[in-house]
Structure formats: C-alpha cells, structure tokens
Amino acid sequence: MLFEESRPRLEAIAYRLLGSAADAEDAVQDTYLRWQAADHALVETPEAWLTKVLTNICLNRLTSARARRETYVGQWLPEPVLAGDRMLGPAETVEQRESVSIAMLTLMERLSPNERVVYVLREAFGYAHGEIAEVLDLSEANVQQIYRRAKQHLATGRTRVEVDAAGARKIVEEFLAAALSGNTDSLVKLLADDAISAGDAGGVFVSLPKPITGALRVARFLRTLFTPGEAKRALVGGSPSLFAAVVNGVPALVMVNGDRVVIVVSLEVTTEGITAVHTQANPAKLDRATREWAASDHGEPLVASW
C-alpha cells in the first residue's frame, strides 16, 4: 500500500516538526484519513501530495502548541526517541543526525513554524528549495531567505561528538559514576563551563521553572538529583534500574522501573564537554520509549537497583 510505504518518512518529518512522537503519530493518521478521502486519480505525485498535507497539519499543530506551552507547567522538552525507532528517520549525514537531537529539537522551538518546516525538509530530508516552496505555497527566493534565517537562529558554533553505542555507554558510565559519587568536582570536570540542565516533569513531579546554567550549579543540582532516597523512589514507583542507551542520537541514561521507562537523561556532548543535560520525566512523553524499550535488547544495567 502506497501510504504505508510512506508512513515511516511522514512520521520522521512530523516528529522533527512537532518534537512529540505522540503528536507525530496523530498528524500522520490525520494525513492518512485525508488520503483515503482524496481522489487519487487527481494526485500526480503522491509523495509530494502527502508531504504537503502533513506539513499543513503540522503547521496548524505548531501554532496551537505554542499557545499550550505558554501554560505548560515547568519546562517543556521534546519527547525522547530510542535508537532504532523508525521515527528518527534518516541518519546518514551529520545534519540528519543533529536535526533530531533533543538539543536541536529544543532550539527549534525558537523558530517560526515556516522556518522550522524549511529547516527540517532541507537539512534532514534533502528537499530542494523549489520543492519546499511548492509545499508551503511560497516563492523559491522566499524559501531560501527563510532557510538562511533559520540556520542563523540555530547556529551554536560547537562541534558535537559523534558516538556509537559503545562510546555512548562509556560516556554514560563516566557521567553516572560522577553523579553518584557525591563529589561535585568530578561532575564539573565533565561539563562545559556554560553547561545547562533542563528538565520536563509535565507537572506530575516538582520541577524547576527554568534551566540551570553554569558547570558548578549544574553539578550541584545533578549531585542532589542522583542521590537516592525513599521520597525519590516513591515518585518513580520503586527502585529502578539504570541503563546506558542512545536516545535521539546522543548518549543517554535510561531509568527503568519494572517494564516502564520512568526517566530519560540525554547528554549533549561536544568537544568542550557535556554542554546540556536534558531530563525527561513526564510520563505522557515516555509511552513510546517504554514500548520500544520492551522490544529492544538493552543489555545489562549499569545499576541494578538505584
């Protein structure tokens, strides 16, 4: 079936545009319903038609999402997606891998909806400016201008460290050892001077209203966060196991209680050290991760019972 062949690509586009796997699934399903109702004889290029319909659905969702996030309790972070999930889409180039990192998805919240569409379709999926112009009903010159502006907004001047599963495990092991040691200096050594720590608890748990910045402040916060205690165990439903994984293309610590992923800590690593620690603890944003975790081979835990 043509649509099912296109579904993985559509899901990958929608996830990058929305930062939510659940919303991406809904957007793709809405696209499917419109495809079912369309007169296929009038559709000259199905792939282009589907991309245009999906993009318009996502544009509408982005506009409403901005309004919802103004009343979101605490910090908002994208939904994490485990390595191997088809929603991550193409990962052959550095640009494709970077476009799906938690750090980049968070940065893309700064963009206007059109800027985000142009950047995603160009960087992650290799669409020509002319093709994007047709999707958005804009001139090619306008799309080129929007693309340049989006690139400027997202430029960090940093070089990400690319790691495989073994490399990610080593980074997570070192990070976890420092976090559990109770020694702030050990963590500071791993962090970039201007490192940030941001967390999304979705109002379910108590969370900080804005990110923490600076290596020393982040290290102190992480030392406290990773110190076990009965109150913390009660929040996650017991004594979870801690695993190393790759999430959105970066090293991550995954906290699992029974058969459920309860927290994902993603580490943005550059040549300067760990520049960002993103903690996702909102249960509503961990459903897909839980399903994918159950179906994957995740190896032995770094800590069997925290």
Image: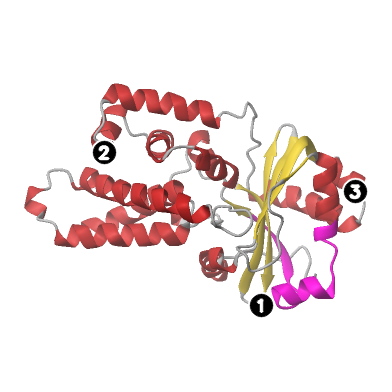
Which secondary structure lies at badge 1?
A: loop
Which secondary structure lies at badge 2?
A: helix
Between marks 1 and 2, how big is the CA–CA gap? 45 Å
Between marks 1 and 3, how big is the CA–CA gap? 30 Å
Read off the residue under disc 3: 184
Q: Is residue 236 magenta?
A: yes
The percent position of residue 64, horizontal first and vertical second, equals: 41, 53
User: Between disc 3 and disc 2, whose residue precedes?
Assistant: 2
Q: Residue at x 79, y 66 (%)?
A: 303
Q: Are marks 3 and 2 in contact (CB under 8 Å)?
A: no
The percent position of residue 128, horizontal first and vertical second, equals: 31, 29
Q: Quadrant of residue 45?
A: top left
Q: Residue at x 26, y 28 (%)?
A: 130
Read off the residue under disc 1: 258
Q: Is residue 126 above or below residue 47?
A: above
Query: Identity of the amino acid at label 3?
Result: Thr
Q: Is residue 10 above or below residue 104?
A: below
| Residue sitting nearer the eye, 239 or 199 | 199
Magenta residues? 224-245
Read off the residue under disc 2: 135
Left or right placement of residue 91 versus residue 146 in this view: right
Q: Is residue 305 visible?
A: no
Q: Mark 3: few, some, or many residues within 10 Å (few <14, many ≥20)? A: many
Between marks 3 and 2, how big is the CA–CA gap? 50 Å
Q: Comparing marks 1 and 2, which lies closer to the viewer?
A: 2
Left or right placement of residue 27 versus residue 38 in this view: right
Q: Which image quarter holds the C terminus?
A: bottom right
User: Between disc 1 and disc 2, whose residue precedes?
Assistant: 2
Which secondary structure lies at badge 3?
A: helix
> Residue 275, which numbered label?
none
Q: Are marks 1 and 2 in contact (CB under 8 Å)?
A: no
